[in-house]
Image: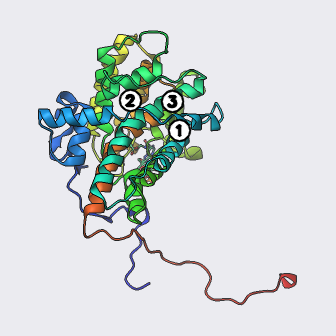
Amino acid sequence: TGNVTLDVGFVNTASCESDITYIDGDQGILRYRGYPIEQLAEKSSFVEVCYLLIYGELPSENELEEFEAKIRRHTMLHEDLKAFFNGFPRDAHPMPVLSSAVSALGTFYQDLDPFDPEQVENSTIRLLAKLPTIAAYAHKKSLGQPFLYPDNSLTLTENFLRMTFGFPAEPYELDPEIVKALDQLFILHADHEQNCSTSTVRLVGSSQATLYNSISAGIHALSGPLHGGANQAVLEMLTKIKNAEYDTDTFMKKVKDKEDGVKLMGFGHRVYKSYDPRAAIVKETAHTVLEKMGSDELMEIAMKLEEIALADDYFVERKLYPNVDFYTGLIYTAMGFQPKMFTVLFAIGRLPGWIAQWREMINDPKTKIGRPRQIYTGYTERDYVALDQR
Ligand code: CMC
């Protein structure tokens, strides 16, 4: 094995160089292309952030208009692709549906060559435009409700809300505060350098697999409860406490004793060893949205858990703070989303980051196929034993 070093979970190993996202985990700093997340969350829009991440600069007014127009042209799904949703059981989790539909997109379009910039651009736009439609249809399918065609007079986020919650025969009234809050959440999720799903997208892409197939793999990586699936897991945890399956103190004791592997979901991060800057913004948004929708018992439980954790040695010593997933589920619930849809919302937000990172990887002359080594710990050579002698 020569000079191979063991680094389980890639705690100390950088897999690439990147110009896209900067994180300082000790100081709780996050910047996309140099711009602080706080400024982008307050002043930018999700579509603008998509542009920034993918092309490296904030767009001019014309560039933004053109970009939005291109996305609008591609929001519809091929009618044959719509039939695809009937192939899943009604109670299917929407994450595998999302991932499968993204794989399927790569069979409907021929813009597959990773080294043809025009084709990469086409698949980039198609993915950005169609993922919200796919996500809304996965939701509609689970309820047995009719699909809505996109309304291209709306923005990407507005369109997604309407396709998710609207009905064909009724006008859908958009609430500007909800639109703004969801758009902001998409911005906060848009990139996070070499996290598990992004590394997956890059690793799959390093074999020169298509953008569609790489993103499809990334969606699966995101689905796990230690990654994007944490937002659903947080809500389930809070609901259990609310339903008095256990009180907060008993629950926290279980976490600290590591009983049955119970964790305080939505806490801790590989890189942040101080407050996750995204969580600070999400917490504020949660207050605004929940105030509007009426006070919420789950929010109170969440705040109590945070208060206990931030003053407890177990969490202080390990530098465990709320991460982006801790409060998002509460906002999504107030907006009317089922818990199963939470990680899908994360995927819509993270998509521009995956695309930007994949494109950076494909255009980097230093890229090589991702192929980690191992430390072999199995048997040394031994002789085959015939079946009747075992
Ligand atoms: N609750 C209780 N203990 C924890 C938690 C938690 N949420 N997170 C970490 N620890 C403990 C862990 O048991 C370990 O203790 P010890 O030193 O005694 O063995 C110590 O803290 C260090 O944790 P680690 O597991 O070595 O840290 P990691 O960098 O490998 O894992 C993590 C990071 C995010 C997977 C982990 O903190 C975790 O499982 N958190 C809960 C799931 C979660 O909220 N995930 C969302 C992450 S942010 C958004 C995203 O990426 O999708």
Mark 3: secondary structure: helix
Q: Residue at x 26, y 70 (%)?
A: 366
Q: Position of residue 90 (x, y in %)?
A: 64, 30
Please report the residue visible at 41 percent of the width from the left and 12 percent of the height from the top.
172
| Nearer the observer, 223 or 267 | 223
Identified by mark 1, the residue type is: Leu
Q: Amino acid at mark 3?
A: Tyr
Q: On the image, numbered disc 3 is attached to which residue? A: 137
Give residue 156's position: percent from left, percent from top: 33, 29
Q: Nearer the viewer, residue 152 or 100?
A: 152
Q: What whole-number distance in Å separates the C-alpha atoms at marks 3 and 1?
A: 11 Å
N-term-proximal mark, 2 vs 3: 3
Q: Are marks 1 and 2 in contact (CB under 8 Å)?
A: no
Relative image position of residue 117 (x, y in whole percent):
27, 56
Image: 201 above or below 266: below
Q: In front here: 140 or 344?
A: 140
- Figure check: 184 above or below 206: above
Marks 1/2: CA distance?
A: 34 Å
What residue is shown with label 2? Answer: 327
According to the picture, the residue beneath numbered tag 1 turns out to be: 81
Q: Earlier in the sequence, mark 3 or mark 1?
A: 1
Q: Secondary structure at mark 1?
A: helix
Q: Nearer the observer, disc 3 or disc 1?
A: 1
Which residue shows up at 58% across the image and 38% down it? Answer: 84
